[in-house]
Image (spheres, rainbow, N blue to C red):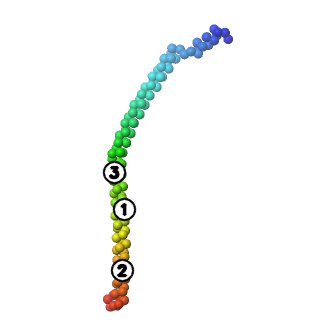
């Protein structure tokens, strides 16, 4: 292959003006789509920031209040458990006293 043939082969492989124009059109379309995607990402980022602010200012404090209320309820239930035990002890004592009273005076039953 001589130099002229090599040059002709290279020229045949080179892109034509129409090819370059088509590539530019495709590149413009890709850039346009990329711009739209960037806009959507910006909107999503803004929404995420709003969600984070809402979470920080409203949801987290409400969860803390709920947890505090739950701990107070647990404390009250513990107190009630203690009171139930005391009432049961008193009831048992009364039952024993009734039994003793009936044993001493069978006519009281």
Residue closest to the far left:
108
Describe the element under mark 3 as helix, strand or loop: helix
Cα distance between the residues tagged 1 and 3 = 18 Å
Residue beneath label 3, please?
A: 62
Q: Which mark is residue 28?
A: none
| Residue at the image position 37 percent from the left and 79 percent from the top | 92
Residue beneath label 2, please?
A: 93
Residue 79 image offset from top left, x and y in percent: 35, 67
Residue beneath label 1, please?
A: 74
Q: Is residue 78 above or below residue 97?
A: above
Sequence-first tag of 1 and 3: 3
Residue closest to the far top:
4
State the residue in front, 101 or 30: 101
| Residue at the image position 47 percent from the left and 20 percent from the top | 25
Q: Quadrant of residue 89?
A: bottom left
Instruction: Name the quadrant of the C terminus.
Output: bottom left
């Amino acid at each position: 292959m001589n130099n002229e043939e090599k040059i002709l082969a290279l020229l045949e492989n080179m892109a034509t003006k129409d090819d370059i124009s088509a590539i530019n059109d495709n590149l413009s379309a890709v850039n346009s789509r990329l711009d739209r995607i960037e806009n959507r990402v910006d909107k999503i980022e803004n929404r995420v920031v709003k969600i984070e602010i809402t979470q920080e200012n409203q949801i987290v404090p409400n969860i803390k209040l709920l947890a505090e209320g739950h701990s107070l309820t647990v404390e009250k239930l513990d107190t009630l458990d203690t009171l139930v035990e005391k009432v049961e002890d008193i009831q048992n004592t009364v039952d024993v006293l009734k039994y003793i009273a009936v044993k001493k005076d069978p006519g009281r039953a």
